[in-house]
Amino acid sequence: MATLTYVYADSTAVLGPLATYAEPHCYDLCVAHSERLTAPRGWEVLRLAPDPADLGPSSDDLEALADAVREAARPAPEPVPEPVEVGRRGHLRMLRSPE
């Protein structure tokens, strides 16, 4: 996958690594479309090769995965029973503990 950005002032289409945040006028392309990309006549296509070190998972990716696994393994809290209303006078209510 790659991100396509147009530099209108230079008549250049820049195809680089997938962007990490959303940017207006940037378009994420799948592998098939990024390989077949052509630019308008008179324009140049600049293809930026990704850094091989960035292709594998980063320490942030691994830490996020570990946090997600820990969160999923945490037991669900037991539901707290609702108190039972035994009387009412105006806006006041008398409640009994469900235990």
Image: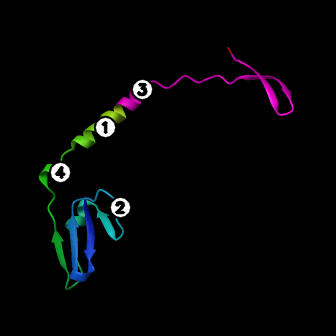
Residue span colored magenta: 70-98
Callout 2: 10 Å neighbours few (<14), some, many (20+)? few
Which circle's residue, 4 or 2, is located before the other in the chain?
2
**Residue at which label 2 appears:** 22
| Sequence-first disc among 1 and 2 | 2
**Residue 71 magenta:** yes
Label ID, residue 65: 1
Kindly identify the residue that appears in the image at 13 percent across and 49 percent down.
53
Answer yes or no: is residue 56 visible: yes
Kind of residue sitting beneath label 4: Asp
Q: Which residue is mark 4?
A: 54
19 shown above or below 67:
below
Marks 3/4: CA–CA distance: 32 Å
Which percent across, then down, holds residue 59? 22, 41
Choose the circle earlier in sequence order: 1 or 3: 1
Tell me the quarter of the picture where residue 97 sits.
top right
| Mark before the other along the chain sequence, 3 or 2 | 2
Q: Residue furthest top?
A: 99
Identity, as a three-letter code, of the amino acid under mark 1: Leu
- Amino acid type of disc 2? Ala
Amino acid on which the number 3 mark rests in the picture? Arg
Marks 4 and 1 close (CB-CB < 8 Å): no
Would you identify the image quadrant in which residue 84 lies?
top right
> What SS does tag 4 mark?
helix
Disc 3 element:
loop
- The residue tagged 3 is 74
Residue 25, how many percent across, how many down?
Answer: 34, 71
Residue 6 got which mark?
none
- What residue do we see at 23% from left, 60% from top? 31
Could you tell whether 81 is left or right of 95 in the image?
A: left
